[in-house]
Amino acid sequence: MEIPQTKSIIESLLFVAGEPVNISTLVKITEVPESEIRQCMSELIDNYKLTGSGLVIAEIADGYQMITNPENGFWVRKLRNINQNTKLSQASLETLAIIAYKQPLTKVEVDQLRGVNSDGAVKTLADRRLIKIVGKKEAPGRPFLYGTTKEFLQYFGLKNLAELPPISDFLKEDAA
């Protein structure tokens, strides 16, 4: 394989991975010798630095990851704040409330409590980093357990989960 093609493949792999990829994984996938992978990686890192690109390749956690250029951090945070301030749908709010009060629980448990499929709401909440996978349930199939995140607390201005209103407050409203 030619160096430009190897660099292109490495770049694509780093872009889609979303997490650090180590050299041995790149060798295994590309079937290119480690020395050539290291050479390509070095050239890619230098190319991104020289061009002043909005993306860079960083050495993180014993691997390499494509990340946004730290010099553009202000703009990236600004975008995330705009996206974060968009309203949540009723389905997402219901799902988030169930997870916040009953965590950790599986998506199937959320579906049972809501009485409808929650795939879209769970994906939206995870994309907005309001919930995350916190483990796996000791049950057949080992389904993921979901819980809230620090971003959840920030979004709702809470110090911790103890600041959530008591669930009994909502039951009183339903009875009235």
Image: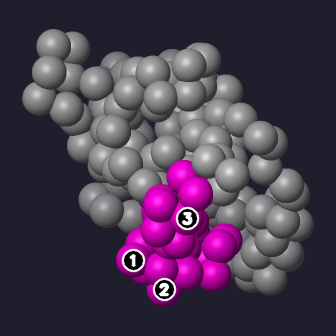
Q: Label 1 neighbourhood size at 10 Å, few (<14), some (14-19), many (20+)? A: few
* Residue 114 found in image quarter: top right
Q: Give the range drawn in magenta.
A: 148-172
Q: Label 2 neighbourhood size at 10 Å, few (<14), some (14-19), many (20+)? A: few
Tell which of 19 and 104 is nearer to you: 104
Amino acid tagged 2? Lys
The reply to whether callout 2 and callout 3 are in contact (CB within 8 Å) is no
Mark 3 against mark 1, which lies toward the viewer? 3
Left or right relative to 79: residue 132? left
> Residue lying farthest left?
138
Q: How far apart are marks 3 and 1 (CA)?
A: 14 Å
Tell which of 80 and 114 is nearer to you: 114
Along the polypeptide, which appears first: circle 2 or circle 3? Answer: 2
Circle 2 sits in a helix, a strand or a loop, which is it? loop
Q: Mark 1 points at which residue?
A: 162
Q: Mark 2 points at which residue?
A: 159
Amino acid tagged 1? Ala
The reply to whether callout 2 and callout 1 are in contact (CB within 8 Å) is yes
Whether the magenta-drawn stretch holds residue 150 is answered as yes
Q: Which mark is residue 169?
A: 3
* Residue 108 found in image quarter: top left
Residue 124 drawn at (x, y percent): 67, 40
